[in-house]
Amino acid sequence: MKPLKTVPSIRAWVCLLACLISLGMVQSAVADDWNLKDKNGVRYRLSEQKGKWVLVNFWAPWCPECIQEFPELIALQQQHQDVQVLGVAVMYKNRKDVLDMAAHQALSYPIVLGNEDTAADFGGLLGLPTSFLYAPSGKLVGRHQGPLTRIEVEQAIAQQPGAAALFAP
């Protein structure tokens, strides 16, 4: 007896497409000159970060891999004056969850309370954490999905062989 093939219903496909659109995964344009406001009201624009490497890291308070990379990003920010880390919280229930996590983890870099629109401005996210690395010229080096270590980012900044694969254009 042959097993029955299941065909996803139209409703399932519509739901999946709606989810992808709401997460900004269908858009492909990457922000040329973004403008982010952190939890303290301080604005960060890519055009104002010239001369620094900038790592924009999207995370969520419920994401174990995001939490795993916090100490690495803190160390990166503390050890390199020419690097600016910006944490963008997305997919959270309420502001308090983000602020509590930032305080509990002693995040020393700016935290932005983002949303699906913020993610869409960067071309969307396929998962968390996702990081975007910008060169001191303001040019996007690429994006990386998954947790990063301080050493991996340092290698990418130093343009060491093999590190280029960390950040896909």
Image (cartoon, rainbow, N blue to C red):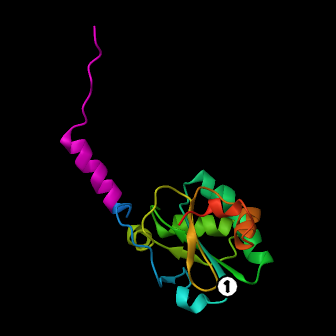
| Residue 41 seen in this snapshot | no
Q: Secondary structure at mark 1?
A: loop
151 on left or right of 25: right
Which residue is depicted at the point 59% across and 55% down?
146
70 on left or right of 31: right
Q: Position of residue 43 (x, y in %)?
A: 53, 88
Which residue is depicted at the point 67% across and 64% down?
104
Q: Tell me which amino acid carries mark 1.
A: Lys
Q: Nearer the viewer, residue 117 or 146?
A: 146
Above or below, 113 relative to 41? above
Which residue is depicted at the point 70% across and 62% down?
163
Q: Position of residue 155 (x, y in %)?
A: 75, 66
Q: Is residue 12 magenta?
A: yes
Question: Given the current orientation, which residue lies at the most extreme front position?
Answer: 161
Q: Is residue 13 magenta?
A: yes
Question: Given the current orientation, which residue lies at the most extreme right position?
Answer: 79
| Residue 154 seen in this snapshot | yes
Question: Given the current orientation, which residue lies at the most extreme bottom position?
Answer: 48
Determine which residue is flagged by label 1.
Answer: 52
**Residue extent of the magenta highlight:** 1-21
143 on left or right of 94: right
